[in-house]
Structures are given as structure tokens and as C-alpha cells.
Image: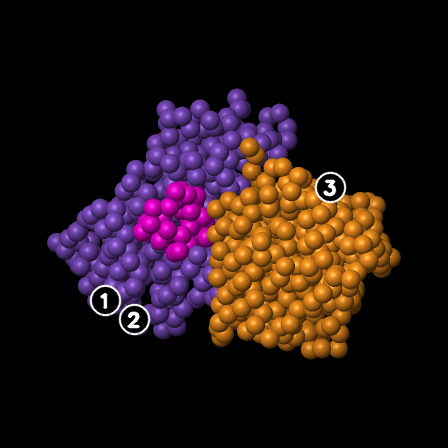
Chain colours: A orange, B purple
């Protein structure tokens, strides 16, 4: 048996107001006068105070990205081409400032600047050949764990699947809970539940070890403080939950909920956070305790999930979702262990989707 | 306010039997045929099965180290000179295989191979100028957190103090709980309590943030499972407690117990783990709940601490310990915050030591 040699974000800053240190972090990367930095920023921040705080120099490139839809391989290839057209040399750093989707776009661009071909070629596990450009993650929404993970999840021509590699991991993250202050309640909830749910999947999975367990247990405890209590430090705690949840799945794997949610996102365009919540709500059989506690959290925050989404969809739409969901081998291996192929049938998945 | 940009061990392997992967890890460092590796190994493993499992090549250097006494700057300088005499070029990796003392020796040697002068010059904070040789930590006793920390604690000509720097952090750690199987009960207890105690100090300290809190709380929970319960996975859990405790103090600071323990170690030669336990047992006023729970753990494992060690010592011996303890500024700043200098008086510390 061989154990994963787990690549971790090697530098991190945590603290309210620490975003102000980004300029200093980048100064260490800027070695000659024409060195430039690329900022990939969620366009919800356009025209907001955060825009004015971005330490942009004259030679830098700011790319606003819209992540109303899930990020795509096409979008990544477009952004990469923009960077290449902007300056013939490589940037010294790529900054992702936003939620999981924006951070994943920044990770993907930093990889595609040094790896030839389109990003869809690299959807999968350990297909990336060359180290990325230095890249920095700065969450402004917390829960996905993208700041800690070795993936950049993209919708590609065939499916939604990450660029999973050691090179995907950020070189630096800045966790400033002031930045997650103004997130709308529903998004705050759905994104935080991404963390809660992947911890459940990690803890109930067959890949679990005591490393992943310790992280997932603590991340769940923190989610409880945030979503069932009303702790004064809840923004900081959610930020830590997200980071620790990411650390847990990086050394284990997500499970049935993410597999189903990937199908939902890919075919119906649901965003990752809400997609997970919709999927989790029908997975009592897989995760009875987790789903029960999740419903308490839903209730406490008056969140109503969309219902009967798939009930009346045409069979071929359901079949398309089943196909994506079924293809998530490592996730199902985590759920069932060896022999998962016999358990993950079209019938089982079709019945699941019809209940969504 | 500026927040620390925290350097973390960037690659880690966790799992029972993962020591077998060391050869593969080193293969990635060995680039030319005469590249050599230095193994710094606790001599308790001499002649034991672990010795035969060390992936030593003909060109490598194996340094057995004795850590019955606390590691010293002199010992580090001697080991560094041995490496330099062995081969004119730098090793491609330095491996520390043992407990906290051995890992600290390996860290210190990896630093001193690339930084001129004696190691005592670098006792303090951020005095190291050049990156270290690639270095790998492999604990065979758990609790110190040395595998995760940015320090290598040494007794020098003037005091016991670490080489604290980003470069001190291991490039790779391997956490294989099989290796901590055969640790004698008293050492298992004292070293594990190092973790428990520095979590108490971190959680009660003024430097605490939610990052350090999350890690310290989880490490303490794991210590409870190990030392108050009797969990079948207790070796894995202790290994995680140690790692998470190290992550917590790396982003906060230890406190009164470590300050007193440093004095005890430096003057009377007590090893770090037992020194902490002896000191903690008189610190009810600082950490009432932590000390009470610690005594439950002592009782459960039938550990009897030495008593009345300092009661009858000459005044100048006590004064020497007080001097070392008082000099630990950052630790006292963590205990009392600003103005700690007024509170940490010779009288207070002398009274404390007389009760030990």
C-alpha cells in the first residue's frame, strides 16, 4: 500500500485585515521592473470598496470574472489567452480573489500558462506536467475549501471535473475574514454547507484516515458553531472550517453528494454550493445523521431549497445527469470501497435524481 | 497590525507503514550519482529493526545521535562539521528520524550547512539568512510538534532557545504511527503532555487567533481520546495531536510552562517533556483547568512526577533558572500581553521554582 504524499499550501496569512499584506507578498515575487501580476477577481467586487484596495501596479493585469455560471474550461482557455496577449512573458503571480469558482479559475490559469494545449486535456488526476506560475488564493466567500485543495473544478466539453494535481495547490493563501462580511445569506449558507457536506462525506467514506478524520471533525464542529450557534467570531470560524474541510478532503475524498451534485451542475447549471444542498437533501440513506443535522441548519436560517426539479424532466436529461454522476469513480470508491461499480447502477441513480 | 506569513511543511505522508516510502521520497532529491543523503537518527534505534529499514545508499552518511541530554549548539556544530568532512559538497537531504530532539538536530544541521558560523549565533527569531538543505522529519515519538514547527530548540552557551525561522520548517514529513509503537510509557506520556501543555498555553494566551484556536482545540480533544480514553487508533490520534499542536503554536506561542521548563532544562538538565510536566504541575494559578485535567491523565497512567527538586537548591542555582525563564520574552508576552515585564519579576519566578 502506498500513501499519498500530500502537497499543502506552504504559506498562509490569517487575520482580520490581512488582505492589506497582499502588496508586500507580491513585492517578494516582483524581481524586475517589468514583472507583472495577474489579478483574477470576482466581478461582484467591481465598483465596491475592495476594488480600490487591490494592489494593482501600472504593468499588472486585472481580469474581472463572472461566476454566475460554473467556471468552464473554455473560460479558462480564454483568460489564459488574454494573459498571453497582454504580455509575452509569464506573470510572476496569479491572484484569485473571490469564492471557490474564482479561486479555481485563478488556479487553472496559473497552470495553463505553463502547460500546453487546452485545459480540458487536463481534467482528471495528475495529468498536469509542469509547475504552475506562483499563485495566491484569497477567499471572499468561505466553505468550498478551494483555498486548501489540489483541484480546480471546471465544466468541460464532456463533464465537470477538476484539474487535480500537486501543482494546482496555491503557493500562498490569505485568510481575511473581513472579506466575507458582506456575503448574501443564501450564498453564505450554501457555500458553508459545501464544507459541512464534504466533511460528512469524508468521515463516512472508506478512504478515511486519522489525518482526514481530525480535520473533518474539527471543520464540522466549527460549522456547528457557525450554523447552529451564533458565535461572535463566526466569520473567522467559518474561514477555518473551510480551510480544514479542504485539508480533510485533500487527504480523503468527497462522496455521493458531490457525485450527484456534479451531475446537477453539469446538466442543469446549478452552482456547486446550492447543487450540493439540493443533492444532500435526498441522501438520507447514505448519510442519515449528517442530513438530519443539515436540515436543522436549513431551518435555523430559513433556507428553502428548490424542490421537484427533476421530477418531470425528460428521460434523456436525467440520463445525462446519471452519466456524469456515474463517471465520478474515485468518489464512489470512497462511498462503497472496492466493487463500487456493481452498486452504482443507472437504476439507483435515476431513482435518486427523480426524487430531487 | 501585521499578521505572520506562516510557513507550513509543504509535503506530508500519513499512514501506518508509510516509512517505507522514504526511499521514493529521497529518489526525487538524488539527481546525480554522487548525490548523498545524511540520516540523523536517535541511537535508541541502533541495532533495532528500524535500523535495517533505513534506505541508506553506499554514498550516504548515517549519524547516530544521543539525545539523553537536550541537544546543544555544540552538538549541532559537531554534526555539521562531520557532514562537511564526509563530503565537500552539500547533501541533497538531511533526514531526522527520532523524537523532537533528533528532529531538531536534523533541522539545525540542515540550516548550519548553508549558514556560516556557529549555531549559537542563530538562537533567536528570524536570524537565519540562507535557505536550509532539503530536510525531512520522521517522528518516532509523538507530542513535541517538532515535525510541524519553525524552531529547532538548542541549549547554547547562554540559554536554551530555538533557531526560529521559516527555513527551519521541514520540506517533508512522514507520519507513520507504526514507528511510535514501542515508546516506553513514561516517555510516551511526557512527550504527549508536551502537546497537551502547549495547547493549553496557546488557548490561554493573548496571541491566540481562530486559526491557532481551531488547531489547539482539536489537538487537545485528540489528547483526551489518547490519555483519558483508550482508543484503538490512539497511535494515529497522538500523531495527529502532535502535528496539530505544532500547527497551533506555530501561529501563536507557548507560555508560562515552557518558560519555566526552559529554565529547568537549562540548569538541571531535565528533558523537555518531563521538564514541562514538572513545571505544569505548579502552574495552577496560570492554567487551573488544564492543570486539573493533566493530573487526571497523570493518575490514569500511574505517573509519579519528581517532587521537591528545587526546594533545597542553592540560591544561585535558582537565580540561574530564573534568569533563563525570565528571558523568554515572547512567551511571557503571550501570557500577559503588553507590560509583561512588570509582572514577570524575580520574586514571582523564585517563588515558583521553590515550589517545584
Image coordinates of residue A127 in percent, x first then y, are 73, 41
**Which one is closest to the eye, mark 2 or mark 3?**
3
Task: Answer with the quarter of the image where residue B142 lies.
Answer: top left
Say above or below: A129 vs A42.
above
Picture residue at 32% right of the left edge, 43% below the top: B188
Q: Which residue is mark 3?
A: A127
* Quarter of the picture holding the C terminus of chain A: bottom right
Q: Which mark is residue B343?
A: 2
Task: Answer with the quarter of the image where residue B45 lies.
Answer: top left
Q: Which residue is mark 1?
A: B348
- Chain letter of the residue beneath label 1 in the structure image: B
Q: Nearer the viewer, residue B272 or B281?
A: B281
Q: Nearer the viewer, residue A81 or B353?
A: A81
Question: Do the dots labelled 2 and 1 sit on one chain?
Answer: yes
- Chain letter of the residue beneath label 2 in the structure image: B
Determine the residue located farthest toward the top in the rendered image.
Answer: B58
In what element is the residue under mark 1?
A: helix
In what element is the residue under mark 3?
A: loop
Amino acid at each position: 500500500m502506498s500513501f499519498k504524499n500530500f502537497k499543502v499550501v506552504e504559506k498562509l496569512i490569517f487575520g482580520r485585515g490581512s488582505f492589506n499584506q497582499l502588496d508586500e507578498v507580491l513585492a517578494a515575487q516582483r524581481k524586475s521592473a517589468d514583472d507583472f501580476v495577474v489579478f483574477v477577481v470576482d466581478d461582484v467586487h467591481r465598483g465596491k470598496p475592495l476594488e480600490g484596495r487591490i494592489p494593482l501596479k501600472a504593468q499588472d493585469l486585472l481580469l474581472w470574472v463572472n461566476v454566475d455560471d460554473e467556471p468552464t474550461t473554455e473560460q479558462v482557455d480564454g483568460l489564459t489567452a488574454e494573459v498571453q496577449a497582454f504580455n509575452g512573458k509569464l506573470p510572476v503571480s496569479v491572484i484569485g480573489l473571490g469564492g471557490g469558482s474564482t479561486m479555481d479559475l485563478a488556479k487553472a490559469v496559473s497552470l495553463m500558462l505553463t502547460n500546453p494545449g487546452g485545459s480540458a486535456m487536463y481534467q482528471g488526476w495528475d495529468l498536469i506536467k509542469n509547475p504552475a506560475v506562483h499563485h495566491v488564493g484569497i477567499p471572499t466567500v468561505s466553505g468550498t475549501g478551494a483555498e486548501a485543495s489540489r483541484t480546480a473544478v471546471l465544466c468541460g466539453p464532456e463533464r465537470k471535473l477538476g484539474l487535480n494535481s500537486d501543482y494546482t495547490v496555491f503557493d500562498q493563501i490569505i485568510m481575511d475574514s473581513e472579506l466575507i462580511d458582506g456575503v448574501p445569506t443564501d450564498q453564505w449558507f450554501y457555500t458553508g454547507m459545501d464544507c459541512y457536506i464534504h466533511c460528512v462525506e469524508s468521515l463516512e467514506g472508506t478512504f478515511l484516515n486519522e489525518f482526514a478524520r481530525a480535520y473533518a471533525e474539527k471543520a464540522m464542529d466549527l460549522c456547528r458553531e457557525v450554523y447552529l450557534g451564533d458565535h461572535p467570531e463566526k466569520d473567522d470560524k467559518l474561514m477555518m472550517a473551510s480551510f480544514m474541510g479542504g485539508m480533510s478532503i485533500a487527504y480523503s475524498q468527497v462522496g455521493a453528494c458531490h457525485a450527484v451534485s456534479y451531475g446537477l451542475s453539469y446538466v442543469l447549471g446549478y452552482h456547486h454550493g446550492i447543487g450540493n444542498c439540493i443533492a444532500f437533501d435526498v441522501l438520507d440513506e447514505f448519510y442519515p445523521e449528517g442530513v438530519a443535522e443539515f436540515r436543522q441548519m436549513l431551518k435555523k436560517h430559513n433556507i428553502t431549497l428548490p424542490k421537484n426539479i427533476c421530477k418531470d424532466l425528460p428521460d434523456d436529461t436525467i440520463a445525462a445527469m446519471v452519466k456524469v454522476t456515474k463517471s465520478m469513480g474515485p468518489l464512489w470508491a470512497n462511498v462503497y470501497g472496492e466493487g463500487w461499480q456493481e452498486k452504482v447502477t443507472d437504476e439507483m441513480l435515476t431513482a435518486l435524481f427523480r426524487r430531487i
